[in-house]
Amino acid sequence: MRRADATTLEYVTASSHNTRHITLIDPAKQDPNTAANRAMVAIECGSSMIFVGGSTDTPDEVVHATCKAIQEAFELRAFAASQDPESDESQWQIPVVLFPGGAHALSPAADAITFMMLMNSTIRRFLVGEQIRGAPYLEKFGVEALPTGYLVCAPGGKVGEVGEAELIQPDDVDLVHDYALTARMFGFRILYLEAGSGAETQVHPQLIESARTVEDLTLVVGGGIRTPEQATLAAKAGADWIVTGTLTEDAADLQELRNRINEIISALTA
Ligand code: 1GP
C-alpha cells in the first residue's frame, strides 16, 4: 500500500541516509495468510518494502492471493493506526512490489513491479521477451513499472541458470561499471545486483563499489545475505537497498523472524 502523494519509483529512488531493507516473500513457500503475517512483522521491525516473487513457476493466482492478503493486512493496520494518536499511519504505507520470474507471476493488487531486463542473459526471452508479454497486462491494471537493470553475479544460483546469464565474476569491476552505465543510458533508474537466492557468497563488495560510481542509479543488492555483517558489507560498499529472502523464509516462527530482521535493520541503521 503506497502513499497517495508519491509514486513507488519516487519512494524507491529517494535519497536515504541509511541503506533500506526489503523483505522478499516467495508466494510459493507459504499460504497468503502466513505471508501477510510475515510481511506485518517485517514492517514492524523497520523493513521498508515488500517484494513478492522469487520462484520461477508460481501461477498468477497464487501471486495475486498473496499480494491481496498483504495489502489488506497493511490497510487494516493503517486504518487502526489512523485511529490511534500514538501510532503513525504512514508506517503502513509501504509498497508491495512484484519481483517476477516472468510474465506469468503478476497481480493487479501490487503497487508496482521491478520491470527488469536481465542484462547479462544470453537469451532474448529474459532481455525483452517476457517483458513484451507482461507490459499490456501491467498497463491494463495500472501496476507501476520500476525500470530496472538486473545483473546476476556469481554464484548466480537458479536465476543464473534459468536466465542463462553470463555471470559477473567478483573481479569484473570494469564490466559491472559498464553495465551500470549502460543501464543508466537505457533510462533504467534501478540496478539490481543479484547473487542468487540462497547463494553461498553475497555480491562481492567491489562490484557494488564499482556500480556505485555511476550516478543516478539506485542500487539494490540481494542474494546470500544472512548476517548483520554481510548486510553491513553491502551497505558500506554503496547499496541503497538490500534484499533478504531466505533469511526470513526459513525462520521457524514469527518471533525468530522478528529477531532476524531486527538484527539486519540494526546493522543498517548503526
Ligand atoms: C533473491 O536477492 C534475493 O532474488 C534474495 O536472496 O534468498 O539469498 O536472501 P536470498
Image (cartoon, grey):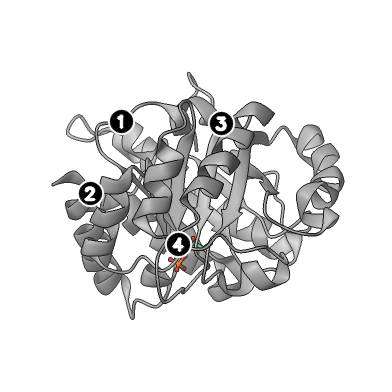
**Residue 92 circle label:** none
Tell me the CA gap for discs 4 and 2.
23 Å
Q: Which residue does the numbered mark 4 point to in the structure image?
A: 170
Horizontal relation, residue 261 to residue 221: left or right: left
Q: What amino acid is labelled 2 in the image?
A: Leu
Other residues around mark 3 within 10 Å, as few (<14) / some (14–19) / many (≥20): some
Q: What amino acid is labelled 1 in the image?
A: Ser
Asked if residue 207 can be seen in this view, the reply is yes
**Residue 189 circle label:** 3
Q: What amino acid is labelled 3 in the image?
A: Arg
- Dot 3: what SS? loop
Other residues around mark 1 within 10 Å, as few (<14) / some (14–19) / many (≥20): few
The nearer-to-camera label among 3 and 2 is: 3
Mark 4 and mark 3 lie on one chain; the one further toward the N terminus is 4
Q: Which residue does the numbered mark 2 point to in the structure image?
A: 268
Q: Position of residue 12 (x, y in %)?
A: 46, 34
Other residues around mark 2 within 10 Å, as few (<14) / some (14–19) / many (≥20): many
Q: Is mark 4 within 8 Å of ligand 1?
A: no
Tell me the CA gap for discs 3 and 2.
22 Å
Q: Are marks 4 and 2 in contact (CB under 8 Å)?
A: no
Mark 3 and mark 2 lie on one chain; the one further toward the N terminus is 3
- Dot 1: what SS? loop
Q: How many marks?
A: 4
Q: Which residue does the numbered mark 1 point to in the structure image?
A: 16
